Image (cartoon, rainbow, N blue to C red):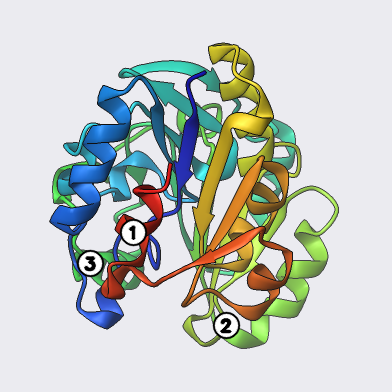
Amino acid sequence: MSKVLFFDIDGTLIHPFHGVHEIPQTVKAELKRLKDEGNYLFIATGRPKAFIPDELLNVGFSGFILCNGAYIEMNNQAIYEQPLNHSQLVQLIRLLEDNHIEYFLETSDYVYIDKRFKELDALFQTFDIAPSKFKHNFDLAEQLKRTLKLELHTMQKNGAFIEEFIKNDFSYDNHGTQDAYEIYSKVDSKASAIQKVLDYLHISIENSYAFGDGLNDMEMIQYVGHGIAMENACQQLKDVADEICGAIDQDGLAKYLKTI
């Protein structure tokens, strides 16, 4: 029976803070072996596709779960796409605009950021993201119909009233000292997307594996048949994982994949 493996990115496939900026060759070899044997490999991330480096896109993954489960792609074809609730999103954008809070919209293919938001634009130009993935001239009303996720940066003092406004309609992740919020669907998650992939491929949950290191991997680690936390994972994730595997900079992922 074929298996399906789901991988987080940062801290799992790569670990820039530990000097691992690309997927190690040992891991690539094991991924190729598993795929050649008829298994399926997915990246499962909160990122939009625009924020995934070409090096990862070209490894040969079967598909991608993006924007925390709001979009699923397999063999370059969308098999699921669920934009945020339009009326709720419109209200949120009004709040941000009224309070002069910079934000950008994420869709399945691009990131849309108003050219007025110079601070936010300058920040993301420092990241390893292709400038062609950012769109500055666009019809806001039209793109709000397609938005899967949004991110905003604001002064920390604004955090409390933003959280109060969004808590009933959206899920969110606050990046603390970065004064950043990722805002996404309350309905979709990495776990719900994994079930959609399994249904699509007619594969049982017992034959699913997930690898991650952060709190936003909690649902998928608990949901799959085999939930594996990286050695560098937060303790909360380790506590619920079925197994722990060595960190990527210790070749732990490659060693684990050899056992599958």
Q: Amino acid at mark 2?
A: Gly
Mark 1, other Cα within 10 Å: few <14 / some 14–19 / many ≥20: some
Q: Which residue is mark 2?
A: 176
Mark with earlier residue (2, 3): 3
Say whether residue 23 is left or right of residue 178.
left
Whether residue 134 appears in this view of the structure is no
Q: Nearer the viewer, residue 90 or 160?
A: 160
Look at the picture and state if 26 lies above or below 4. Answer: below
* Disc number placed over residue 127 in the picture, else none: 3
* Disc number placed over residue 255 in the picture, else none: 1
Q: Residue at x 29, y 75 (%)?
A: 250
Mark 2, other Cα within 10 Å: few <14 / some 14–19 / many ≥20: few
User: Label 3 to label 1, Cα distance in Å?
Assistant: 30 Å
Q: Quadrant of residue 197?
A: top right
Q: Amino acid at mark 3?
A: Phe
Whether residue 149 appears in this view of the structure is yes
